[in-house]
Image (cartoon, grey):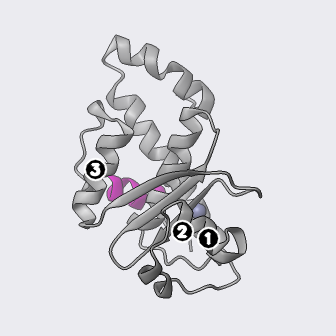
């Protein structure tokens, strides 16, 4: 069953984050504080269709995102992964089917001690979870846009943002 947009709005609202001052860094920092776990972002040269990846370890969260995406797409990908965290999804993707262990280690996405925590299973997040996270990422970006609408310089700044994402007023 897919979590409703209303419920996702509630989750975003409960973050108690001021979207008028949204930057990726401040939002990530806010989520880190709430969860009490550091979040590490790392661009990664995914060779398949993967855009983003969340790898939780015992103490930290690692997000790999596809290298070379335009900024707005990067924001979307990272928000999608944050959605998985905040909605309590259990990662079931076999991280090792996409990335070799040495690649993960090189990228700082894994620490040797953390690896035993990752249970490789052959199926990715189910499609309901994926849809929830797409919705989460979209709603976060909608909040950013709406929160900053009163500020004309922000509107100019966010125009390519909204255009790229295809928001409809
Ligand atoms: Zn996902």
Mark 1 against mark 3, which lies toward the viewer? 1
The answer to whether residue 85 is above or below residue 72 is below
The answer to whether residue 99 is above or below residue 18 is below
Q: Nearer the N terminus, badge 1 or badge 3?
A: 3
Residue at point 42% right, 30% down?
A: 145
Contact (Cβ within 8 Å) of mark 1 with mark 2: yes
Mark-to-mark CA distance, 1 and 2: 5 Å
In which image quadrant can residue 99 be found?
bottom right
| Residue position for label 1 | 102
Can residue 6 be seen by looking at this rendering?
Answer: no
Left or right side of 28 for 46: right
Judging from the image, what secondary structure is the residue with disc 1 in? helix
Magenta-tinted stretch: 5-12
Q: Residues within 10 Å of mark 3 (few under 14, many from 20)?
A: some
| Residue position for label 3 | 29
In which image quadrant can residue 167 be found?
top right
| Residue position for label 2 | 105
Contact (Cβ within 8 Å) of mark 3 with mark 2: no
Residue at point 38% right, 30% down?
A: 146
């Amino acid at each position: 069953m897919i979590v409703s947009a209303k419920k996702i709005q509630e989750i975003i609202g409960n973050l108690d984050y001021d979207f008028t001052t949204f930057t990726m860094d401040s939002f990530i920092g806010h989520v880190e504080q709430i969860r009490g776990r550091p979040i590490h972002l790392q661009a990664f040269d995914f060779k398949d269709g993967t855009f983003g990846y969340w790898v939780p370890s015992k103490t930290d969260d690692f997000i790999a995102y596809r290298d070379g995406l335009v900024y707005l797409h990067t924001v979307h990908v990272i928000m999608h992964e944050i959605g998985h965290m905040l909605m309590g999804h259990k990662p079931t993707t076999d991280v090792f089917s996409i990335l070799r262990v040495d690649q993960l280690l090189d990228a700082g996405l894994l620490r040797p001690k953390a690896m035993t925590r990752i249970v490789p299973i052959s199926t990715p997040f189910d499609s309901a979870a994926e849809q929830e996270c797409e919705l989460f990422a979209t709603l976060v970006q909608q909040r950013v846009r709406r929160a900053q609408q009163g500020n004309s310089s922000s509107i100019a700044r966010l125009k390519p943002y909204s255009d790229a994402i295809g928001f409809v007023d």
